[in-house]
Image (cartoon, helix red, strand yellow):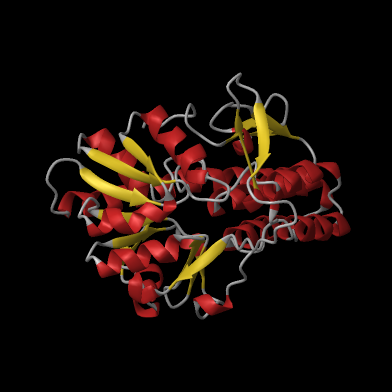
Amino acid sequence: MPDNDALCSLRWDATGQVVEVIDQTLLPHALRWCPLDSLPAFCHAIAAMQVRGAPLIGITAAFGLARAMADDPSEQSLADAQSALLATRPTAVNLRWALDTVVAAVRDLQPAQRAGAALRAAQDLRRRDIDCCAAIGDHGLQLLRDLPHDGPVQVMTHCNAGWLATIRWGTALAPVYKAHNAGLPVHVWVSETRPRNQGINLTAWELSRAGVPFTIVTDNSAGQLLRQGMVDCVIVGSDRTAANGDVCNKVGTYLKALAARANGVPFYVALPESTVDWHCPDGGQIPIEERSDAEILAIAGLDSRGNRQEVALAAQGSPAFNPAFDITPAELVTALVTEHGVCQASREGLRKLLHER
């Protein structure tokens, strides 16, 4: 994976003074950059999952707050914009963290100074995310090197935790990209990730563009692959990590962790420090976003003529329940991989790594 803006998820157009993001709801069939030029546009992009992934959600929201300050730098506008952006996605802790960072940068300034300061804070968060994910990749690469394997390292992942979920490199996929760049053969098992199919639509698309070998599998096949010894490790991301090491990630992660533990396969979680919620004692306190049942009951794709179509999967009137995330207990996590290094998934492990470095 080249380290340049050709593979990034959010860019700043200095000429037009506008943020552009990839509309991820159109992938993998169309690559379209979407300009975000108002607070409602930023809120819609996050809520409608045009952008997704905890780090990218936070950075997008930071630029959204900067946009609001450019339009109206008043105290009331600052409070209203922060509230509107916070309401878009309740689970990912990076959203609040990024907004708090920008608010802290502008709160004590005169209104005329706020727009520039907010933009600088958002741009700094973007740069820091790139460096952070590169470091996660370096630490994760060493784990991949140390794994016993015959042939390519066989990595299983879930959902999308690559550069589409961050700015560049990604979290769970960063070690894969680093391995590929270093000449370490690697192959990725990409689970489809129903109901929004982020694995099929996003992870497979990313890996294909980077030239990394992969195979798409159904979500329900993961246990069988692990049982047959076809997986050397599982690496996933995290939308929020509790202070005790419990991990909240895309629904279906918990089942992979259980299957990995049953078959003696390492289960790693790659995450930036900003994903750790020190105010959340354990995973039971993390709010689980419930999304529309329409995501389960229907599916969209291209027909034989290349036209996008949505079709019903269930009988009309069928009820459905659609939690977007689940909790993987810390005891099922082999290690957490952060920008600062690798640590045990526990309160002690996190504190030693993040507070005593």
Snapshot quadrant of residue 2: top left
The N terminus: image quadrant: top left
Is 121 placed left or right of 215 in the picture?
A: right
**In the image, residue 97 above or below residue 279:** above
Q: Does the image show residue 186?
A: yes
Is 121 placed left or right of 6 in the picture?
A: right
Residue 238 picture location, percent across and down: 47, 60
Foreground residue, 113 or 48?
48
The residue that appears at 62% across and 43% down in the rendered structure is 51
Q: Does the image show residue 2?
A: no
Is 171 placed left or right of 181 in the picture?
A: right
The C terminus: image quadrant: bottom left
**Number of numbered labels in the structure image:** 0
The residue positioned farthest toward the front in the image shown: 315
Residue 138 picture location, percent across and down: 29, 48
Foreground residue, 266 or 130?
266
The residue that appears at 19% across and 41% down in the rendered structure is 152
**In the image, residue 270 above or below residue 282:** above
Residue 222 picture location, percent across and down: 35, 55
Residue 21 picture location, percent across and down: 63, 35
Foreground residue, 143 or 259?
259
